[in-house]
Amino acid sequence: MYHPDVRVFEVFDADGRSLALYYGDYFQRANKSGGAWDDSFVDQSALLGTKPVVVNVLNLPRPAAGHPALLSFDDVKGLFHEFGHALHGMFSNIRYPTLGGTPRDWVEMPSQFNEHWALEPAVFAHYARHYQTGEPIPLALVEKIRKTKTFNEGYATTEYLAAALLDLAWHTLPVDAPQAQVDAFEKSALQRFHVDVPQVPPRYRTTYFSHIWDGGYSAGYYAYLWSEVLDDDAYYWFKEHGGMTRANGQRFREMILSREGTANVDELYRAFRGRDPIVQPLLQERGLVTAPLAETK
Ligand SMILES: [Zn+2]
């Protein structure tokens, strides 16, 4: 249904060929669900002759009449995140539609990967300007934004891992396991994985961990962090190979974004990276190692 908030862009490839339609529905409305997400109206398929039609939905604060929308950095990251999902859909270049969809622990890889560019100096300088004078944001403020990225990451990582491991503990019980007493099982599982830290309880406890019971995440709650291992590691490939260049972006598009559904994603990733993913880039991005890493090539 038409709504004046929704903007539609036809996206063209470098050679002028029409590639996709992109719908952007950015602002809060009274009757709109909260949060931000990406969805696809039409998936690309050469067999069916369909081109992608994707939508990014956000809930940005609506500007006052006659004023531009001014975004917090969290909102900006949300935009980059959802646009990463959109790029994944729009660059799809496959013949057969996939039946299984995207593996859960890969879904957030292109979106979280795209968030890295929000603070890329050339990109940042392009959009982060004073809305009246056009002046760029002072470097000292940019540095502050960078520093906030690692705030409380020890806590955040531990509470997340505890919940993810608890999920795996429940879902790897054999079918004939005796009925467990919930609190005792939870305690022993956290101890077994060395995350029984009283000061850092798991993000969700068994009794209200709705993701893993009726939320469809059974044994898959780890996926958010695994996607982050992949997106940080992929981002470090860029850092090791000259950064944000057109050639590097094209390579990412051709080897990762456009090919999903033609091979297992771990094979695609290995071909792109030249090896399996490693955790060190994530540790560095989260500020959990103090010294810069040696080259991880
Ligand atoms: Zn996402």
Image: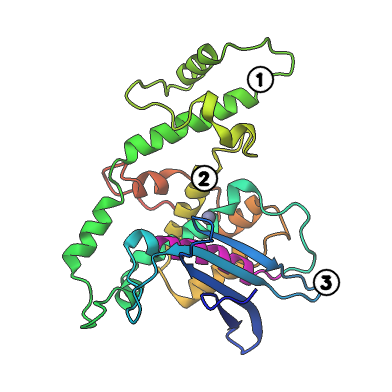
In this image, 198 relative to 271: left or right? Answer: left
Q: Which residue is mark 3?
A: 47
Q: Amino acid at mark 2?
A: Tyr
Q: Which residue is mark 2?
A: 224
> Which numbered dot is residue 251?
none
Q: Residue at x 47, y 15 (%)?
A: 187
Q: Which residue is mark 1?
A: 173
In this image, 48 relative to 241: left or right? Answer: right
Q: Quadrant of residue 171?
A: top right
Closer to us: 5 or 218: 5
Q: Amino acid at mark 1?
A: Leu
Q: Is residue 239 visible?
A: no
Quadrant into which the C terminus falls: bottom left
Q: Residue at x 65, y 80 (%)?
A: 19
Q: Amino acid at mark 3?
A: Leu
Per the rendered image, the range of residues in magenta is 77-93
Q: Which residue reaches farthest right?
A: 47
Quadrant into which the N terminus falls: bottom right
**Residue 60 on the magenta span:** no
Residue 280 image offset from top left, x and y in percent: 41, 45
